[in-house]
Image: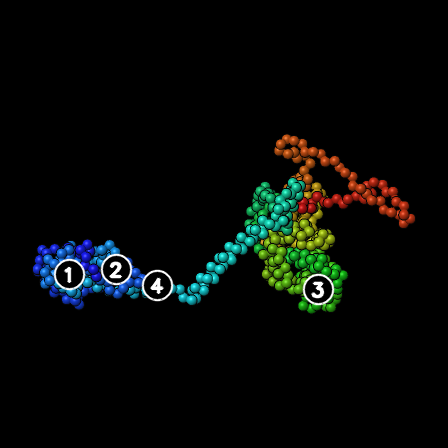
Amino acid sequence: MSESSDKLIAVSKQQPVQLRRRMRQVPKERQKPVQRQQQSAKKPDNVALTKLSNNPATVPSGKQKSYSQVVVPKAVKPIPKARTAVSKPGTGIRTVRVPKQGILKTNRKASRKTRLKPMARTVLYILRMLIVGVGLGAIVGTLLSILDPASRITSTSPSQTNISQSNANSSVNPGSLYLSQEILQLKTSIQNLATSNPTLIPGVFMVDLDTGAYVDVNSNTIFPAASTIKIPILIAFFQDVDAGKIRLDEMLTMEQDMVAGGSGNLRTQQVGSQYTALDVATKMITISDNTATNMLIQRLGGQEVLNTRFRSWGLINTAIRNPLPDLQGTNTTSPKELGELIAKVNQGNLVSMRSRDLMLDIMRRTERDNLLPSGLGEGGRAYHKTGDIGTMLADAGLVDIPTGKRYIAAVMVQRPHNDPAAATLISSISKLAYQFFSQTAVTPRIPTNSQPTNNLQPPVQPFIQPQVMNPTAPNGLVQNLPIGTNQTPVTPQYYRPQ
């Protein structure tokens, strides 16, 4: 190394001798390696720092130079508090050996801990690919929806919008019974009758099919069904007739296990006798024949099949658990479920209109008429089915009034064993309902005097006479028929507007 004067560093001569001696006595094994704060990738193992005196001739060769005034060249960064060892005393050159800086073991351990296992890396890669795939799918779907020609057609005529809205409004709950508000006046009168007979527990459900006004007195209470269970059995029978599973003229054979006591006359006939399916269904309703009921239950698939069908209709409380006669009352139903069933039949939701008319004709011929029919006025007609066991008396059906109104009535009364007061109560409730609904005006389906809210008369649509096609005679001549010969059928007012 050069010893030129401009690179020499002055060393003070006033350094105490004690200090110099103490510095010479520092043992080498106590020297600590110097750790540099900033690591370098490639550094030499030993770096020599040379300290030269400004006047080497005046410094005695046997004396130690001072450490108080040390200047480190700019090319070398300062080393924090490192102890030095003099290698060549007397020459003015001091060498500081710095051990090689390596990578800390703590950093190596940390880097190993942060490394991902192969399985974790695979899972992370899959998640990234899924995110990318979802993003690409969303972008492609957006582009396809924009480029789709069908999405560009946004203009619809107002008439089409009105028609679609009207169809949507008319199709809300098409199979459910429409209920508007409860008739509190009639309900109070019925409750007063029940209060005067504390030993009787009535359940009443009535609905005006024109307005949806109803009466509900314990209508969800579960009662023994007795013979009212024959109403849903009759509906299931005509459903199979509509589906082509049973013919009305199909012959059914009476077997020994079908014979039942109680009401009806088939039990007096010889086992093995055959009857048409329509005749069996008619006897089940008109004379409440229990043997005929058991024959239809077996023909329709049995109790479980019928119970499954009842649940598909939305019935929860109605179920067959034993063949007829069910004197213990294990077969159950409720006034509301019976009323809803009859209302659905009236609307043509469960059976066809042809089967509905045949059903009502059978129910009109029910022989027992001391319950609902006994409370009707002149001209009233009931399509109903009764139920009678020791602990319960019931009657449910449709009632027609000469004014054109039709309403549902289902009354079930729990009573002491064969108490005749139950029949009187049902007859009195029927009389109250008939009087109330007879005074209620029939609601027209299409209002004739309604005015819009802006006090402007709507435009009058001209009546267009439909063109009548005259039939052609066999000789090719056109027959001249008077106008009005072919008249459109008139829908009865008791049908609920669709």
Query: Where does residue 223 sit, x and y in percent of width and height?
Result: 58, 55
Query: Where does residue 33 sit, x and y in percent of width and height?
Result: 22, 64
Rendered image: mark on residue 36: 2
Rendered image: mark on residue 463: none
**Colour scheme in use:** rainbow
Q: How far apart are marks 3 and 2 (CA)?
A: 115 Å
Query: Where does residue 275 sit, x and y in percent of width and height?
Result: 75, 63
* Tags 2 and 1 touching, CB below 8 Å: no
The residue singled out by tag 4 in the image is 111
Q: Is residue 246 above or below residue 396?
A: below
- Which is in the foreground here, disc 2 or disc 4? 2
Rendered image: mark on residue 92: 1
Task: Give the residue at the far left of this rendering.
Answer: 17
Q: Of marks 3 and 4, which one's residue comes earlier in the chain?
A: 4
Q: What residue type is labelled 4?
A: Ser
The residue singled out by tag 3 in the image is 267
Total number of numbered labels?
A: 4
Q: Of marks 4 and 1, which one's residue comes earlier in the chain?
A: 1
- What residue is drawn where x is 68% and y is 65%? 259
| Secondary-structure class at tag 2 | loop
- What residue is drawn where x is 74% and y is 66%? 273
Task: Give the residue at the far top of this rendering.
Answer: 455
Q: How crowded is mark 3: few (under 14 residues within 10 Å), some or many (20 or more)?
A: some
- What residue is drawn where x is 10% and y is 60%? 60
Q: Distance between the residues labelled 3 and 4?
A: 95 Å
